[in-house]
Image: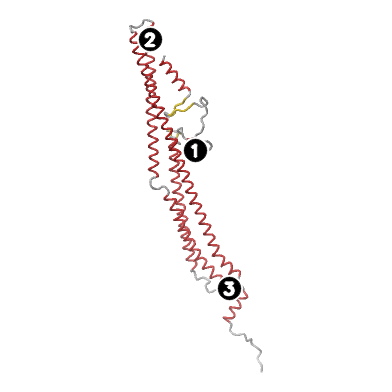
Amino acid sequence: SSVRSLLSVISVFLLFSLQINCVTFPLPGESPEQQLLKPNEWSYCDYFWNDKKDPQGTTSVAGFEVLLQKQLKGKQMQKEMAEFIHERIKIEEEYAKNLSKLSLNPLAAQEEGTLGEAWTQLKKSLHDEAEVHLKFSSKLHTEVEKPLLTFRCDNFKKDLKKYDHHIADLRKQLASRYTSVEKARKALADRQKDLEVKTQQLEIKLSNKTEEDIKKARRKSTQAGDDLMRCVDLYNQTQCKWFEEMVTTSMELEKLEVERIEWIQQHLRQYTTLRHETDMFNQSMVEPVDQLLQNVDPAKDRELWVRENNTGDVRPVDMDI
């Protein structure tokens, strides 16, 4: 009767549960609704328990593996952002070089007067602007590109592998425990069937089996039931440990992702700050040019030129005989 009771409990357990890749889940609608561990936060620890098919649909990818791939993708995105900033730096350096070269161009160097002053200031502003862009490129390297390149570059992948191996080992242990449960379940079913057959044979006198044989079969059946209970208990302990480690580790990965996003946000905002500063410096250099252009006075330029280049202000008169 104890064996039948055990089988009944196991049957109820199976009725209200579903095994997927050696992990036990409740059947939809057959158990009280589970509360999220971190409601309204869309936390990693609530949404990556099941496995999913890979893009080809051939093999299953563990939910935890999806989280690890997210971390590796984030690392790659961070690297590509640094490469993008590096390209911007090269453009700024080349631009500064060309501006500086252009500022030394002698074209229109002989322009005079107030217009000549404005033209000279315009050329000088190119040289100053070149310096600003060089400083901008230098700060981009030290304050944006370098931080993006060096963020978690030492042991990050090694740490991810540790997480991966730890959770994978627990899944392997869980699979092993599940196999033991299945073997024990089959052994119990075989022992139970053997006991029922021998009991029926004894009752209808079709066999010379004795009561002692029945007792022996009953003991084996009870032992098989005990073995199954032990295997189920070990399985549940392992699944519980895997569950706890999944929660802890997935929340750690979640924390790492938050830190990554905030780090990148901080340094991209630094990029925009430096860009604004560059614009302000460039504007300050253009302002003197604007002022001098506003002061350009054709009449004054004519006066200055005439004063310097006149050949005499005595006009010719008619010849007198």
216 up-or-down from 51: above or below: above
Q: Mark 1 points at which residue?
A: 43
SS label for mark 1: loop
Q: Which residue lies furthest to the top in this view?
A: 205
Rendered-image quadrant of the N terminus? top left
Q: Measure the alpha-carbon separation of dots 2 and 3.
A: 122 Å
| Residue 310, percent from left and from top | 59, 82
Q: Can residue 222 be seen in this view?
A: yes
| Residue 36, percent from left and from top | 51, 33
Which one is in front, 181 or 300? Answer: 181
| Residue 225, percent from left and from top | 38, 19
Q: Measure the alpha-carbon separation of dots 3 and 1.
A: 68 Å
Q: Badges 2 and 1: C-beta atoms under 8 Å apart?
A: no
Q: Name the residue under label 2.
A: 199
Identity of the amino acid at label 3?
Thr
Residue for point 55% across, 72% down: 117
Q: Name the residue under label 3.
A: 114
Neighbor class of circle 3 (other Cα within 10 Å; few <14, some 14-19, many 20+) is many
Identity of the amino acid at label 1?
Ser
Which one is in front, 100 or 202? Answer: 202
Q: Can residue 56 be seen in this view?
A: no
